[in-house]
Amino acid sequence: QVQLVESGGGLVKPGGSLRLSCAASGFTFGDYYMSWIRQAPGKGPEWVSYISSSGRTIYYADSVKGRFTVSRDNAKNSLFLQMNSLRAEDTAVYYCARDQRILDIWGQGTMVTVSS
Amino acid sequence: QSVLTQPPSVSGAPGQRVTISCTGSSSNIGAGYDVHWYQQTPGTAPKLLIYGNINRPSGVPDRFSGSASGTSASLAITGLQAEDEADYYCQSYDSSLSGSVFGGGTKLTVL
């Protein structure tokens, strides 16, 4: 079935780095735009980044621009988020989602905690 | 501060009808970008409930309906059931941000 599975979350100190992965299955990954969405504890979702099907078009939320880098490997049906210079306010559950301006498929999420 | 504005909470008795509003601006809903609604229960990912303002994915009961006009949209739930108790989020696209924007969420309590 259509599925997204995130991995790579964990506890990291402020200023540290983390790389999240999202494995897609059940659909032709390379045909779809993808996004990363995060949700801080007790808050609503926040869009983080968007990458086109080819990877040539990328956008970031202002809150992560210059610190986060999104990429994809269509041959391996995988999406990535490299997060550098992490801050306490980046603490959240990070979801990958299939993005057709409708976020129709979401993964289960991976928790990122930034704390000393 | 979310780009789209929703009431923090709504409530209703079983069988009643409730509505949840979502207000945006000229760079998102007012620009003609569609509004989508998601339902989220604790510990789970948001689930698509309404897409393209008015459409239901297969499997979503017809008790859920959406509408949009101008810079606002609404989600209506009729015949409230205990299982409808959840957080509801609206989402659209914003041309000034070149990305998705969300409402802050509305917690529905079934009394």
Image (cartoon, rainbow, N blue to C red):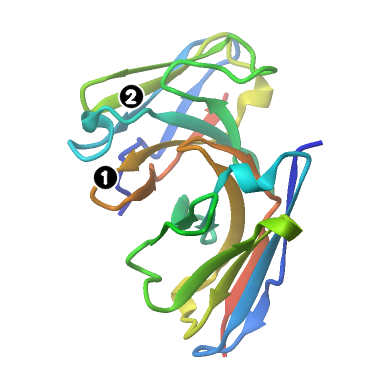
Three-letter amino acid code at disc 2? Ala
Question: Which mark, residue A75?
Answer: none
Horizontal arrangement in the rendering, residue B46 relative to residue B32 (left or right): right
Residue B31 coordinates in the image, percent (x, y)? 22, 32
Query: Which secondary structure, mark 1?
Result: loop
Position of the N terminus of chain B, as image quadrant, is: bottom left
| Residue designated by label 2 | B73
Which residue is nearer to you in this view: B87 or A110?
Answer: A110
Q: Quadrant of residue A22?
A: bottom right
Write the residue at 54% across / 60% down: A41
Horizontal arrangement in the rendering, residue B11 relative to residue B86 (left or right): left
Residue B34 coordinates in the image, percent (x, y)? 37, 28
Write the residue at 37% across / 22% down: B74
Q: Chain of mark 1?
A: B
Q: Vertically, is A112 above or below A46?
A: below
Horizontal arrangement in the rendering, residue A52 relative to residue B26 (left or right): right
Position of the C terminus of chain B, as image quadrant, is: top right
Q: Vertically, is A100 above or below B3?
A: above
Question: Which mark, residue B95?
Answer: 1
Query: Which secondary structure, mark 2?
Result: strand
Which residue of the protein is positioned furthest toward the right in this rendering? A1
Write the residue at 54% across / 30% down: B109
Q: Chain of mark 2?
A: B
Other-residue count near label 2 (Cα within 10 Å), few / some / many at <14 / 14–19 / ≥20: many
Residue A26 coordinates in the image, percent (x, y)? 78, 40
Other-residue count near label 1 (Cα within 10 Å), few / some / many at <14 / 14–19 / ≥20: some
Which residue is nearer to you in this view: A54 or A15?
Answer: A54
Three-letter amino acid code at disc 1? Ser
